[in-house]
Image: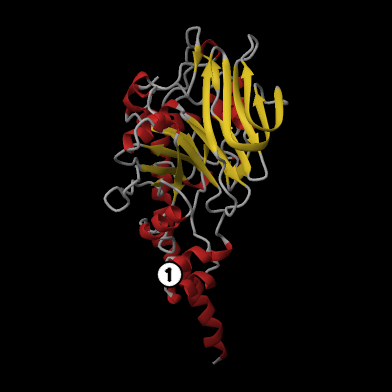
Amino acid sequence: MNEKKILQPKRLLFTFIRVFGFLVLPIFLLFVSINTIGSILFTSELEKHDFGAKGIYNPYKISEQNKTKTKFTSWKKVALHLHSNEVWYTPERQSLQDLSKSYSRNGYEWLSISDYNRVTDTRSLIKNSFLSYEWSSSLLKRHFLFVGVQSAILDPFYFFSTRENIQWIINQHTKKKAFIVSNHPTLYDSMPLDFLASLSGIHAVEIFSPFGDDPKIMDRLLERGKPIFAMSADDLHYLPLEESRLNGESSIIEFWKKISLVYGREGQAFQRFVLMNLEENNEEGIYQALCQGNYVAVRKFDRRVEDFKLKKIEFDNNTLRISFHENVKEIRFITSSSEPNYIVQNVSEAIYYLKEKDKYVRAEVLDFKGILTTNPVYRTEEMEIRPGCRNGIQ
């Protein structure tokens, strides 16, 4: 009897070793082999790009045909970087219908589902939606948001990747004229500043993310001659409990989420988004606004507070002007990653005259509601030529 008790754990151990040796280990080695081969084959050289000709790039420039349209001052609240249950390995996440209901309920007019390594086309189900997906170099958390593409490129770099590998991925999506965002660069320090600065083809960096809010990342890249825009996103994985209940989620699913601690991982829903100034209120208008930079990035301190009542942003005669429908606590004009160059308080409008020494300027608004930042107006001779995007916008 005692011998049987001793033999039983040994048998279990031997069984585990056999399963590991004949099943788990070969699969692991297969993925390592794919990663190794991929890291050798799929590379692109890191190139230094030329700087532009002398001039000023204004992301808020209005096209001639829209200068007389008053609707062009209407800012649309847009959510990107949202995850759904459409991917097989994330079944406990929210359905497309629930995401649509909740974001519409919270004042959003456009949204994009950005599932991992696949394009979830929601346009037939959700009226005001557009295409994107999150590409992930898994263990290293080097994630990118590719907006405006029809299909995904699978990740061949499961465990490790070089800068040249990441540049190859970016180049493949540049050919597709995607709008390219570096997601949550501060997560596990996956995208250090030197790493980001060595890459080309990135249009924006996620400066407002549940994994870290840091607008100065954009400033540091601009100082290095990288013409980078801002991005703000919820990176939503789970809706808050009260939202799920409003959507009529079943008690069985709610119970399952509670025991799996999903509601302890809700993140910060409805707090990070962009306000877009659309020339046309349609999908193509979304892509155009992103590529041009005709939007602002917002980070609210609490999802229940009112949104910023942004009125207008314009740049004319070397002067950047930003105005609101109400007073805000503070408007700062940033021209470097150090201290703000100019600050005004308790006003509804502020202006800044671009000086000869300024490479760029952006407005940053700090209020009890949260933080809002514009994209930079910059001197083109001080920046690399901006990567192409939708319809070849430069």
* Image quarter (top left, top right, bottom left or bottom right) of the N terminus: bottom right
Task: Inspect the image, locate mark 1, and give the three-letter code of the amino acid beneath it.
Answer: Glu
**Which residue does the image show at 66% across and 40% down from the upper left?**
367
Extreme left residue here? 124
Say if residue 351 shows up in the picture: yes
Q: Position of residue 205 (x, y in %)?
A: 53, 34
Where is residue 42? Give x, y as percent.
Answer: 38, 32
Question: How many marks overall?
Answer: 1
The residue to which callout 1 is attached is 249
User: Which residue shows up at 53% across the image and 61% down it?
Assistant: 240
Tell which of 106 and 130 is nearer to you: 106
On the question of residue 26 being in view, the answer is no
Tell me residue 62's x, y (percent).
Answer: 42, 22
Left/right of residue 345 with respect to residue 112 in the rendered view: right
Q: Is residue 253 above or below residue 243?
A: below
Locate residue 91, reporting x and y percent. Answer: 40, 62
Q: What secondary structure is marked by label 1?
A: loop
**In this rendering, position of residue 257 left or right of residue 319:** left
